[in-house]
């Protein structure tokens, strides 16, 4: 049982670390409107929520059905976690947690920086596609 808890903690910690590292590596100063610490805290909170969803809900659910020899929650208990996990996933996807009183400002700062980064990436991809189209039109043979 202790190994199971260590695996859960490692999954949650790894996901939180991935979110925080993403803020350091991908976000430039022009993406961050607020103080960078607010964005980092938002990344930690978002990573913690996603990590709990993955490590405390989906991992036990998967392990209980695929590897019945591992001690953990029985299949009946794990199957009751599907609906709360689905609701939490909807809350995360729709950004409803950004309206929460205590964590809302941090999540909004992180989401704003992530959206600005996504816009920059999309613009760069559009420029690359347009240059490919121009190059293709220039190389196309003209009919007399």
Image (cartoon, grey):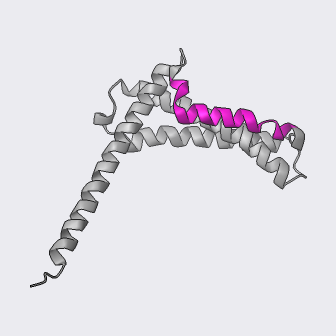
Residue positioned 65% across, 32% down in the render: 88
Tell whether position 92 is magenta: yes
| Residue at point 36%, 24% (across, down) | 35
Tell me which residue sits at (51%, 30%) in the image: 95
Residue 14 in the image, given as x and y percentages of width and height: 60, 43
Please say whether residue 66 is one of the residues in the magenta stretch.
Answer: no
Dominant SS in magenta: helix
Whether residue 34 is visible to the viewer of this picture, yes or no, is yes
Q: Position of residue 32 (x, y in %)?
A: 34, 31
For residue 43, above or below residue 140? above
Tell which residue pokes out farthest to the left in this image: 144
Residues in magenta, as a range: 77-98
Total number of numbered labels? 0
The answer to whether residue 74 is visible is no
Q: Which image quadrant for residue 115? A: top left
**Residue pictured at 84% horizontal, 51% vertical:** 65
Residue 12, image x, y percentages: 65, 39
Question: Where, quadrant-wise, is the N terminus in this rendering?
Answer: top right
Displayed quadrant of residue 137: bottom left
The residue positioned farthest toward the top in the image shown:
101
Query: Would you place residue 75 above or below residue 143 in this image?
Result: above
Left or right of 84: which side holds 67? right
Q: Quadrant of the C terminus?
A: bottom left
Counting from the top left corner in percent of width and height, residue 52 is at 67, 35
Closer-to-camera residue (9/129): 129
Compared with residue 33, is residue 135 higher up or lower down, i.e. above or below?
below
| Residue placed furthest toward the bottom | 144
Residue 130 appears left or right of 108:
left
Q: Locate residue 113 relative to residue 87 in the image: left or right.
A: left
């Amino acid at each position: 049982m202790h190994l199971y808890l260590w695996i859960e903690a490692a999954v949650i910690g790894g996901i939180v670390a991935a979110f925080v590292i993403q803020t350091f590596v991908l976000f430039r100063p022009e993406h961050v409107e607020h103080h960078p610490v607010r964005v980092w805290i938002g990344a930690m909170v978002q990573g913690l929520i996603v990590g709990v969803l993955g490590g405390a809900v989906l991992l036990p659910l998967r392990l209980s059905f695929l590897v019945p020899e591992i001690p953990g929650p029985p299949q009946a208990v794990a199957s009751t976690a599907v609906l709360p996990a689905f609701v939490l996933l909807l809350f995360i996807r729709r950004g409803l947690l950004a309206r929460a009183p205590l964590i809302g400002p941090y999540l909004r700062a992180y989401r704003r920086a992530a959206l600005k980064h996504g816009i920059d990436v999309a613009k760069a991809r559009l420029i690359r596609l347009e240059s490919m189209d121009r190059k293709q039109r220039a190389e196309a043979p003209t009919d007399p």
